Each structure stands twice: as structure tokens, then as C-alpha cells.
Image (cartoon, helix red, strand yellow):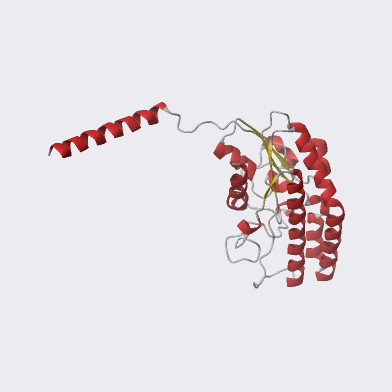
Amino acid sequence: MRRSRLATLVLSLVTALGAALALAAPAQAAPSDHYVALGDSYSSGVGAGSYTAESGSCQRSTKAYPALYATNVQPASYRSVACSGATTTSVINTQLGALSAATTLVSVTVGGNDVGFANIMTTCVLYGTTDCVAAVQAAEDKARADLPTLLRNVYTGIRNRAPSARVVVVGYPVFYQLGTTCVGLSVTSRTKINEGINLVDDIIRTAAAAAGFTFADVRSQFVGHQLCSGGTKWLHALNFASIGISYHPTAAGQSGGYYPVFRSKAG
């Protein structure tokens, strides 16, 4: 009986002490990061909706992966200057000014517009397989020739302006799941488009590593949620009513595809 009472007393004291410590400590310490998001429409969140009024034609969404990170992690400061249509040149000319020596975390998704993602998809939809394959091949040739230098220029600019920052370079999802019955583009076109995206991602990954940056590869995260897959689609198909969102991540693609991969790399 005495042992039982003693055990009860000890348990009560431990419980009370734990409660007191819980009250004394903050529920979650505020992270100290000063985070800046750079990049194109995949970073601004085109296709996810809920665009901020201040962003105008850049279409920065509160459901884009940088905004989701800011909401969930609550860094000391957050600013997104990502913009729909951005290229490596426009990131250098109009976005790097948001960085400073105080910046501790940077994300960037860029490169797709430099090789003409949008024009390629327009060609593939309107002109058929032969023209589609030729357009992708031309983009692949351009990517191999030009993209490494263009990316290096961006990454050097980031490092010069934010010398102490952790930099996470985020890639692109592959659009199509192959081996399924799918209405629209031919199997040959879909296969070639996927090949082109994989090439761009691989070039970005290599350039990021050379700069000492971290590459966040979203391709495997989107498997099962691509166009022509049987699962919930995380990418918009061709949308004639709102052409700009075509082939961009949905809100679910940002939250289920991009955000967890970025979060795992950013910390």
C-alpha cells in the first residue's frame, strides 16, 4: 500500500513538474532565418490561385511553396520576388536586389523559360508530333549549350549578395506519366517532353552542385500525380479558358509536391 502511495506521489510530482516546464518554455522558438524566394512561375505559384494584390502580373500565390514555408515555419522575415515569366536574366536584373548580407535562406526555381517551356507546349498542342519533337530537340540543344552558363551567372549573383545564405535550388516536375491511356498528345510527344524536362533538371542539379547549393528534386514526389496518371492530378492540363495556368502545379501540387521537398532541404 505504501509503495502504491509513493508511486502515485512520484507520478504526481513528475506530472506537475512537466506541466510547469511546459508553461515556462515557449511552444515553438521563432526561427531566425531571413528568407527570400526568387524565380519564375513555379516559384511564384501560377496555377495555385490566391494571388496577392501587390504581385500583379507576377502572380505570387499564398499557396506557393515559399509562402507555405513562411506560414508554417515562420522565419524572422520572408519576401518573395518570384515572378511569372522570369528568366535567368530577369532574376539577375530584377530579383537579386532583394538579397543582402542578412539573408540566411534563399530558394530559386528558374531555367524553364530560358529554353522556352511555354512555346514548346504551344507547338506540341497546335502542330502535332513532328513539330513537337523538333521543338523539344531544339530546346535540349539550347539547354546543353547555354543553360549551364546562365545558371552559373544567377548562382554567382546570389552568392555575392547573400554570402552566408543557405541556397536551395528547386527543380521542375516531369509532366506526364507514361504507359497509360491518355487523350491528347501522342505517346512520342509526351515521351520527348518528359525527356526535355529531365535534361533541364539534370543541368540545374549539376549547376547547383557546382555552386555549392542544395538541389531539391521534385520529380519523384509528383509520380502518381502527373498528367495521364490515375491519381489526383497535381498539374494543370491545357486550359484554354486560362491558358497561363496550363502545365503548372495546382495548389495541391504546391502543397503536396513542392513544399515537402523544399522543407526537407531548407530545414
Residue drawn at 57 percent across, 34 percent down: 74
Given residues 188 and 260, the one toward you in this image is 260
Q: Please say if 218 is above or below 159.
A: below
Occupied quadrant, residue 92: top right
Residue 92 vs residue 256: left or right? right
Q: Please say if 62 is above or below 77.
A: below
Q: Position of residue 185 (x, y in %)?
A: 74, 68
Q: Position of residue 131 (x, y in %)?
A: 85, 67
Outermost residue to the front: 3
Residue 210 vs residue 233: left or right? right
Given residues 40 and 123, the one toward you in this image is 40
Given residues 210 and 204, the one toward you in this image is 210
Q: Quadrant of the N terminus?
A: top left
Residue 45 visible from this viewpoint: yes
Q: Position of residue 261 (x, y in %)?
A: 61, 49
Occupied quadrant, residue 3: top left
Q: How many numbered marks appear? A: 0
Outermost residue to the left: 1
Given residues 183 and 135, the one toward you in this image is 135
Residue drawn at 82 percent across, 54 percent down: 116
Residue drawn at 26 percent across, 36 percent down: 11
Residue drawn at 55 percent across, 39 percent down: 72
Residue 50 visible from this viewpoint: no
Residue 142 vs residue 258: left or right? right
